[in-house]
Amino acid sequence: MFPELNAKLQAVDAAKAKLDTARPLPFHTAASLRDKLTLEWTYHSNAIEGNSLTLRETKVVLEGITVGGKSLGEHFEAINHHAAVLYVEEIVAKQEPLTEWQIKNIHGLVLKEIDSGQAGFYRSENLVISGTSTTQPDFLQLGEKMHQLITWYGQTGQKHPIERAAELHARFVNIHPFVDGNGRTGRLLMNFDLMKAGYPPAVIRQEEKVAYYDALDEACLTGVYDGITALVAEAVQRSLATYLDLLQLAQKAKQERNSPTGPSC
């Protein structure tokens, strides 16, 4: 690991430790933060894959309103991703282990009503993925490759959680077990692992799409995961900053309410 990456991970852990001292968070604070990050996660993950809904439009769709001029598929992508996030939160809360069954369930939610025939099922054909330097496994090898992924994951207890989550994502994307929805499913798996370890979700922004794809391509081609790990660490740091900034504002407001002179202008 490069010293720069180690420094990033240490900075993230310092911020997480600061957040941990404030837990449990006030109910409404935790709910508002969760809603904010879930919306951003859904918007950016879909935008990376070409969904044209804006952040505000994504919010409106999740509130049950149809956006004019947008395809039905784009609406389903937002609704489905949000449902998949809720499912990930549920299995994290239950401390369920990562299994192929869980992965298929997540993918099934991602493609629900979009391609129901493929949702939750490994591909039965070979693919050529444009823009990548690697060749995905033959579809006849998918069962073995996914079993190997789960076995590898079960042996990574000594890895830093961010390293493990980033590598899990890259390894999964390199297998590319589904016809469609691999990127969104991979990012959901990444955040499943992060959240299970007590970190907030990493929101890879659509503005980082090129750097993100380059880091994934490097990881899949060389087996060196420092680039994708650094990108994930930066995303986790942003999420932690969102939590800490809001807590700081709440603490300041509380101090002002308790001050003899009252709130400052």
Image (cartoon, rainbow, N blue to C red):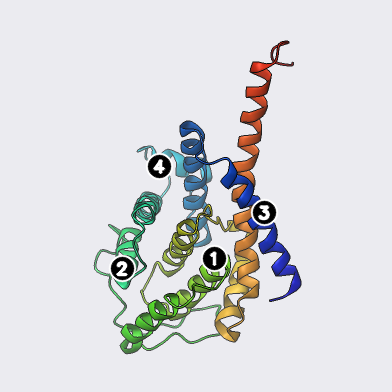
Q: Which numbered disc flags the more N-terminal residue, 3 or 2?
A: 3
Mark 3 or 2, closer to the camera? 3
- CA separation, marks 3 and 1? 14 Å
**The furthest residue to the front:** 21
Residue flagged by tag 1: what amino acid is it? Pro
Q: Is 186 or 168 nearer to us in this picture?
A: 168
What is the x, y in percent for residue 72?
A: 35, 51
User: What numbered label is drawn on residue 249?
Assistant: none
- CA separation, marks 3 and 2? 35 Å
Q: Which numbered disc flags the more N-terminal residue, 3 or 4?
A: 3
Mark 4 or 2, closer to the camera? 2
Q: Is 79 or 170 nearer to us in this picture?
A: 170
Q: Is residue 13 left or right of residue 80?
A: right
Mark 1 or 2, closer to the camera? 1
Q: How many marks?
A: 4
**What residue is disc 1 on?**
161
- How packed mark 4 is, by other alpha carbons closer than 10 Å (few <14, some 14-19, many 20 or more), is some
Q: Which numbered disc flags the more N-terminal residue, 1 or 4?
A: 4
Question: What is the secondary structure assignment of the residue under circle 2?
Answer: helix
User: What numbered label is drawn on residue 104?
Assistant: 2
**What residue is disc 3 on?**
14
- Residue under the image location 37 percent in, 68 percent down: 98
- CA separation, marks 1 and 4? 33 Å
Question: What is the secondary structure assignment of the residue under circle 3?
Answer: helix
Is residue 261 visible in the rendered image? The answer is yes
- CA separation, marks 3 and 4? 36 Å
**What residue is disc 4 on?**
61
